[in-house]
Amino acid sequence: MQKILLYYKFAPIKDPETVRLWQTALCQRLNLKGRILISPHGLNGTVGGELAELKEYARQTGAYPPLAGIEFKWSDGGRDDFPRLSVKTRPEIVTFGAPDQIRVNACGVVGGGKRLKPDQLHRLIAKRGDEVVFFDGRNDYEAAIGRFKNAVVTGAKTTRDFLGELGSGHYDHLKNRPVVTYCTGGVRCEILSALMKQHGFKDVYQLDGGIVKYGEAFGDSGLWEGSLYVFDSRMSLKFSPGAKTIGRCRECRRPTSRYQNCALPSCNRLVLVCRRCSGSAYFCSALCRQPA
């Protein structure tokens, strides 16, 4: 039986290269594939393989003192949902382009938003109603197929775009309202919520465990709508068979959550196209349609 593990831990890591070598050897020995990033801020990964090997991986990774208490999330899938094993060091485990603006200690990111478990989120909504703002911490193509109801979705194409979005003034009217940041598994919101507070947002929360944990708790019976975009061969997943399809095919506008890559090989951006229209080559923009 195979599964996928998703995990992250913000904690000071003095020698990321040594941790990279250890994680590479561990995953190779256990025949796991996936992606792992290590930085002085911590570790972020998604790996797939046999259940027994994943449990051993989780045990050994959690035994490393800086990563003690790391939380692992389980998801359907397996080793072949990833093309290879990739273990790399980076200045950040989430690339906001702000390594010098983020501080971490043994407790995690310093100055982040208040954590909300899924049930605590519902209590906040019950208490403060429409005053609460959901702020999507993902890229725009992720939000196109699934998001929280009435969420603010920026035009961010990559995580690096968020600093510019926060400094643009477009969201200044939200700075005195309760803002709940959310993302796939929670890692991006650890950073985003801290950056929002640095930009003057007064009452910032982060959804603990992200959409994944919320979906486990409430499925499609709560405040989430649509499919969850995931960064492996599955591309997207639903929390129940009755999930709404909120994405729209760019060609025929029929409901779909299906992506394919831009037909220009040097671009490879994602294009939302339904199966009925997928036989043709589609480009993500007019610029790609007519390359120089």
Image: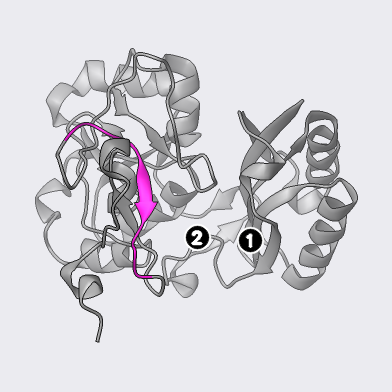
Residue 37 tag number: 1
Q: How crowded is the residue under tag 1: few (<14 C-alpha within 10 Å), some, or many (20+)? A: many
Residue occupied by mark 2: 94
**Seen from this angle, which residue lies furthest front?**
279
The magenta stretch spans which residues?
Answer: 254-264
Q: Position of residue 242 (x, y in %)?
A: 34, 13
- Tell me the element at label 1: strand
The disc labelled 2 sits on which kind of residue? Val
Q: Is residue 117 visible?
A: no
Q: Position of residue 142 (x, y in %)?
A: 34, 46
Camera-side residue of 83 and 76: 83
Residue under the point 22% across and 63% down: 165
Query: What's the distance in space between the residues labelled 2 and 1, CA to CA?
Result: 9 Å
Q: How crowded is the residue under tag 2: few (<14 C-alpha within 10 Å), some, or many (20+)? A: many
Image label count: 2
The disc labelled 1 sits on which kind of residue? Leu
| Residue 89 placement, left or right of 125 | right
| Residue 183 placement, left or right of 23 | left
Q: Is residue 263 magenta?
A: yes
- Mark earlier in primary sequence (2, 1): 1
Camera-side residue of 56 and 63: 56
Q: Main secondary structure of the magenta part?
A: loop
Q: Is residue 184 magenta?
A: no
Q: Dots 2 and 1: beta carbons under 8 Å?
A: no
Q: Which quarter of the image is occupied by the C terminus?
A: bottom left
Residue 91 tag number: none
- Tell me the element at label 2: loop
Q: Is residue 241 visible?
A: yes
Camera-side residue of 188 and 247: 247
Residue under the point 79% across and 29% down: 51
Residue under the point 87% across and 45% down: 30
